[in-house]
Amino acid sequence: MKKYSVLMIDLKNSRSYDIQDRKNIQNFIIDRVEILNRIFKNSIEKKVEFSAGDEIQGLFISPKSAYLYSRLFSMLTFPVQTHSGIGYGTWDIVVENGGTTAQDGIVYHNARKAIDEAKNSLEYSVLFYSKNKNDIIINSLINGATLLSSKQSEYQNKLMLLAEILYPIVSSDMIEYEKLKEILKFVQFEKKENLIIDIDYPVISTQLEKEKFYITEGKKRGLSTQISKILGVSRQSIEKAIKSGNIYEIRNITIAILRAMENIY
């Protein structure tokens, strides 16, 4: 039986916000979710939407697309803190005309277990659950990438988003590449508004070359020069920010996560 993935995301400490702040954050999130739903149109079965309170959820065709969605979501909502759970399993109760909240199955139960564990954990804010022995490896990698990202400044986070727009890490045809340009509206730099970028979309492969036993594909030669020209700042300053923000390392770990997820299919 075919298996799917469900992504659930919940706002951390949502009860500490007053009603107006919660409303503002929800509108802030909705704007970004709508764009991400368009970008990941090819790999979403039931679009991501608010399900209850401050939680959003969606049904995806694979764990890889669910994780990449959650990764971009975290970058676009930085520095808002969230808990996330990604489940993998069968979609047993199918309501054709209903949204994600009308569906049910093992995949939904696994996602609920993942996010509940993340909420109870002091170390993990994102967890993946498929009942596979590789879950431990996948979650350790996800946690490493999440921790490195959480230490970034707002400026470094925006640079990582630019890198993702210029050189997206995806598998097959899971995203609409042209839609990535819509993210630029959320990537505003001081004294540099309304960024315009010409993109050819050279996709970062998640497949390792034969005989290769380590990952370097997350680093792109000339990226700092490319971004420096876009922003009108020195290449050295961009390279320094990329290095201190561990952007290449995070991208390499992302590729490792996608490779590990392939082993559970």
Image (cartoon, rainbow, N blue to C red):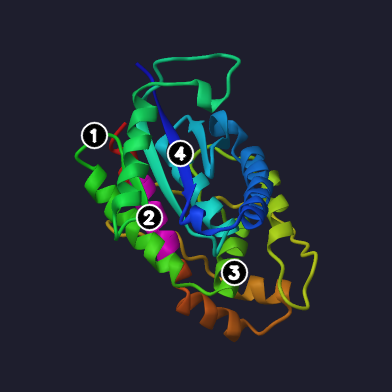
Task: Determine the residue positioned at 29% across, 48% down.
Answer: 138
Residue placed under numbered mark 3 in the picture: 159
Q: Amino acid at mark 1?
A: Lys
Is disc 4 surrounded by few (<14), some (14 to 19) or many (20+) residues within 10 Å?
A: many
C-alpha gap between disc 1 and disc 3? 36 Å
Instruction: Select label 2 or label 3 by which is in front.
Output: 2
Q: Quadrant of the N terminus?
A: top left
The reply, left or right, for residue 264 in relation to residue 242 is left
The reply to whether dot 4 and dot 2 touch (C-beta < 8 Å) is no
Task: Determine the residue positioned at 53% across, 27% down.
Answer: 100
Image coordinates of residue 33 in percent, x first then y, are 62, 44
Q: Amino acid at mark 4?
A: Leu
C-alpha gap between disc 2 and disc 3? 23 Å
The residue segment tinted magenta is 249-259
Task: Determine the residue positioned at 23% across, 48% down.
Answer: 136
Q: Nearer the viewer, residue 92 or 207?
A: 92
Q: Secondary structure at mark 4?
A: strand
Residue placed under numbered mark 2 in the picture: 125
Who comes first in sequence, dot 2 or dot 3?
2
Residue placed under numbered mark 4 in the picture: 7
> Per the image, is 20 magenta?
no
Residue placed under numbered mark 1 in the picture: 131
Check the image and report above or below for 6 versus 54: above
Q: Amino acid at mark 3?
A: Leu
> Per the image, is 250 magenta?
yes
The reply, left or right, for residue 161 in relation to residue 215 is right
C-alpha gap between disc 4 and disc 1? 16 Å
